[in-house]
Image: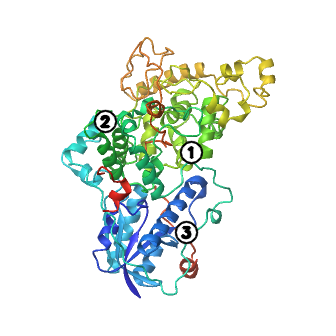
Amino acid sequence: FARMAGIWFRKCLRLHDNAPLLHAVTLDEAVFPFFIIDPWFDRSKVGVNRFHFLLESLRDLDEQLRLVHNSRLLVLRGRPEEVLLELFRGDGPFQIKHLLWEKDSEPYARKRDARVEALATQHGVRAKSFLGHTLLDLDAVVTAPGFKPPISMRDVQQLVSKHGSIPMPCPIPKLPPLLLDGQVGLEVPDISEFYEEKPTSSGFPGGERQALDRLSAICSHTDYVCGFEKPKTSSTGMPQNPWEPSTTGLSPYLKFGCLSVRTAWHAFANCYAGRKHSQPPQSLHGQLLFREMFYVLGVAIPNFDKEVENRMCKPLPWGQNPELLTAWTEGKTGYPFIDALMRQLHKTGFMHHLGRHAVACFLTRGDLWQSWTAGRDVFDKLLLDADWAVNNGNWLWLAGVAPFSAPYFRIYDPCPGPKSSLNADQTGEFVRHYVPELKDMPTRYIYKPWEAPLAVQRQARCIVGIDYPRPIIDHKAAREANLQRFKQALENLGGQSRPLPDKFQSSRDPGAMASKFQEGTSPSTRSVAATRSHERGHRQVKLVEETPGTAELSASLAPNKLRRWAKATKPGTSISDQLSGS
């Protein structure tokens, strides 16, 4: 058997800034890049769009290995420990002497990797993991003397300062050719092998090359990068093109590791250099720091994904109403803004950050009083950028139950007006695109079609209660009831629930990113950053949710062995040039 250094791709689906790959070429061994797919993964928890994005990313990686390095990605199938044990023993066509991978901080992955390390030791295989999916060494952070879990932007900024500067990305090494005498198969499979339904997301093709092209396009517009402020972007997409996000679109690529977070950090820093620019938490660096904060909390806080025995969660007596949850999940609540966002999620795998604010508030403390974990699970299935730490962190935040949550009495109106911090378009384009039942509804009724006279509904060919649902709940009544429920729950927990502000029922919206409720204040209508950039003469960049965030699918195929084995930028240079080490 050929003795090889195995590069186990999981989240790190890229060649740039790949520390395991860089180390492998120093071992003077053949390099064996592989990915493991578990054919028995639970499809009820992984949507077709996200799995399709994964397969596209694997295909892109394989194509790059073939074209540039005379190598390839080998896709193995089976449960990871079983597949790796065969490679350790030499039971398959290869025998691994070294096993290298990028660290994964999710609880499942940490337990799996510990088992793999033990197996490797038993069989004389040298296993080594490397940093790369986060800006910081998470284990070093949480075990450092005096560590306190970060619950604010200031906290995470202090952690970054304490633990040194962000390392520069690794160069791409030249890999030795991978010679496979007589070996065929082990190809990246087609989505039809796993799902009967067809993928419907077309706006975010998977893969490292797509990620780097997107980053390069964004950073070619320094005014956009320097002026980016997340709360000013639109929850309903680009004007005249509601299917195009108003943010950068990088989060799925960060989640799957198609784009290195260190590469993104330094690319933005290069744009900032010598220029006036926005600051965290609103800036692009701020979005990456929020991601880092949730990753740190995911490692530091036991049961971070649970309602009980979780230091970051107040356990509230949420309701359990499957009908309400189903209506919310399917986008059939009778509130067009909420329904359009949820249908967008199903179709594209994407939802803007402020849209996530709106639907999460509606499901939990705002209207339906259902547990944040139920919404979290829906997002975890459908989002392209579903990321364990970030998804849990965001839902804890938006449900109002975490120390870093906004005040629980800040409740979004599901029928946003022009002064709402949700920055929803007032033309109805977004709703008409994703809720076609309302495509002929007059604009004045687009967010409240039940207020349209029957004659208007007939003319629009949409009778509320027949062609489109009636609201499943009265927002005003639910809001008032839930405020009292939340206040009472805090008192029952022994906390000191401060009196509600005199104007807490004001229709004015204090804004999504504010840390304190400011009575009597209201943000002016905000313009979309990308639109502003366009008006300055810059090309609009096709912009996903920055709160990023993969790899629960590092898994694999057949139970029998036969099926398993057979079946910083310099002027004048592009980001891709820099990453290739040229």
Please determine whether, in this image, residue 164 is positioned above or below residue 132: above
Q: CA distance from mark 1 to mark 2?
A: 27 Å
**Location of residue 578 by image quarter:** bottom left
| Residue 549 in view | no
Residue at left 51%, top 25%?
A: 412
Q: Position of residue 256 (x, y in %)?
A: 45, 55
Q: Nearer the viewer, residue 14 or 215?
A: 215
In the image, 101: left or right of 336?
A: left
Cα–Cα gap, marks 3 and 2: 40 Å
Q: Secondary structure at mark 1?
A: helix
> Can you say whether 437 is above or below 475 in the image?
below
Residue 460, placed above or below residue 270 = above
Pinpoint residue 121: horizontal percent, then vertical percent: 32, 76
**Secondary structure found at label 3:** loop
Residue kind at label 3, given as amino acid type: Val
State the quadrant of the C terminus.
bottom left
Mark 1 or 3, closer to the camera: 3
Q: What amino acid type should be assigned to the residue bearing mark 2?
A: Met
Q: Which residue is mark 1?
A: 378
Residue 153 numbered mark, or none? 2
Name the residue tied to disc 3. 188
